Every structure is written in structure tokens, then in C-alpha cells.
């Protein structure tokens, strides 16, 4: 016996609000007993650009809730972004500076933060983060990659190429090495790599 099916489209008008309500329930249980749970909830609000005031409260909890919150690069950077999203520019700058100088800010953390700034078209700020990473973590992968991307973004291809050539010698595997070789070729041709 043959059956036929008719496709049905199901839409949810406010999926983000439903998910935030679910986060509220979860934070009353075990996820609410760790800074990671608060940070993940805050980060969701930030990424979805929803419930930003509540996301700010959750980010503050991730940093400083008694016996649960933890001050580290991840919690501070999320807090800074939510402070900015809520129009608290001065607080956001102070918190961002605190995150960038925090002992838990490793080379990958700083590199990824710089890359996120490039994604936001904040080239000068990204380069400053990549330079900070080079100062704090000289010779460590992927510091030179960040400098390459930062200098390329601010329109200094010669400096970008210099750092790309150093980075290719530090590449931890063939995939990264091949990608850097491709980027070097693009830089030599005067093309944008970001």
C-alpha cells in the first residue's frame, strides 16, 4: 500500500524568546551553578541580539556571582561586549582592557578576539590586539598569523608579508602551512587576504 505525504511547514514566530525562556529555566538548575552556564546564556543573547539587558546581567553573574562567577578572559570579554551592546561604552572599554590584560588571555584567545574585530571591520583595533599578543606571547603560534592579518587589514601589505613568511615557518601542520603559502601568494599579488 502506497502512502503519500504532504509537506507541512512549521514556523515559530519567536524562537529566540522561547530559547531564552529555556535558558532561564536551565540557569535555575545545574548550569546556573557554574560560570560557564551563565556565560553561555549571556553569549546566546549577544549573538542573537536579543534580551541584551538580561544577557548583561547573566554576563555579570558569570564574572562575579558569589561562589560561582569567575573572572577570566572569556567571562570578561563577553561582559565587555554586552556592556557595549547596552550602550555602556566606558564600562565596556574598561572591561575589555581588563580581559585583554588578564593572565588567562592566551595566544589563541587574543588571536580569535583580534579576528572577531576584523570581522566587525575594526582593523586598527584588531591590529592593536595582534600586537599585544606578539608582546605577551612572542614566537608562539598563531601570533605571526595575527600580525599578518592585522597589517593587511590596515593597508600595510609589506609588513603583512614579512609576518606571513615568519608564520609559515611556525605552522603546526600541513593544512596551516598550505593556507599560509596561499595567503603569501595573494599578498605578493597585492590581493586582500581578510
Image (cartoon, rainbow, N blue to C red):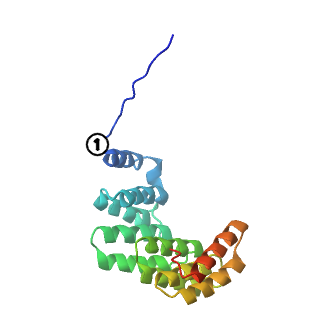
Instruction: Name which quarter of the figure residue 182 lies in.
Output: bottom right
Between 94 and 7, the one lying in front of the other is 7
Instruction: Name which quarter of the figure residue 92 lies in.
Output: bottom left
Name, please, the residue furthest toward the front.
189
How many numbered marks are there?
Answer: 1
Residue 57: horizontal and vertical position, in percent? 33, 62
Describe the element under mark 1 as helix, strand or loop: loop
Residue 168: horizontal and vertical position, in percent? 68, 78
The answer to whether 135 is drawn above or below residue 38 in the figure is below
- Residue 129 visible from this viewpoint: no
Residue 178: horizontal and vertical position, in percent? 68, 70
Between 107 and 121, the one lying in front of the other is 121
74 relative position to 171: left or right: left
Residue 164: horizontal and vertical position, in percent? 62, 81
Query: Who's the residue at 41% across and 60% down the image?
Result: 43
Instruction: Name which quarter of the figure residue 75 lies in.
Output: bottom left
Name, please, the residue furthest toward the left.
87
- Residue 62 visible from this viewpoint: yes
Query: Who's the residue at 48% across and 78% down the image?
Result: 100
Between 194 and 170, the one lying in front of the other is 194
Between 90 and 160, the one lying in front of the other is 160
135 relative position to 26: left or right: right
What residue would you read off at disc 1? 13
Within 10 Å of the Cα at label 1, are there few (<14), some (14-19), or many (20+) other Cα atoms?
few
Name, please, the residue furthest toward the top.
1
Amino acid at each position: 500500500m502506497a502512502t503519500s505525504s504532504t509537506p507541512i511547514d512549521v514556523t515559530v514566530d519567536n524562537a529566540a524568546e522561547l530559547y531564552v525562556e529555556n535558558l532561564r529555566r536551565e540557569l535555575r538548575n545545574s548550569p546556573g551553578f557554574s560560570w560557564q552556564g551563565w556565560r553561555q546564556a549571556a553569549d546566546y543573547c549577544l549573538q542573537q541580539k536579543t534580551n541584551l539587558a538580561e544577557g548583561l546581567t547573566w554576563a555579570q553573574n558569570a564574572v562575579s556571582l558569589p561562589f560561582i562567577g569567575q573572572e577570566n578572559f572569556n567571562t570578561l570579554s563577553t561582559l565587555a561586549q554586552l556592556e557595549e551592546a547596552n550602550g555602556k561604552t566606558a564600562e565596556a572599554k574598561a572591561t575589555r582592557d581588563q580581559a585583554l590584560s588578564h593572565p588567562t588571555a592566551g595566544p589563541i584567545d587574543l588571536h580569535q578576539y583580534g579576528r572577531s574585530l576584523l570581522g566587525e571591520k575594526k582593523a586598527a583595533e584588531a591590529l592593536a590586539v595582534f600586537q599585544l599578543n606578539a608582546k605577551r606571547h612572542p614566537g608562539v603560534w598563531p601570533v605571526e598569523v595575527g600580525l599578518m592579518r592585522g597589517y593587511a587589514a590596515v593597508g600595510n601589505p609589506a609588513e603583512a608579508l614579512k609576518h606571513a613568511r615568519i608564520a609559515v615557518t611556525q605552522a603546526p601542520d600541513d593544512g596551516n602551512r598550505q593556507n599560509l603559502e596561499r595567503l603569501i601568494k595573494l599578498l605578493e599579488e597585492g590581493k586582500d587576504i581578510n
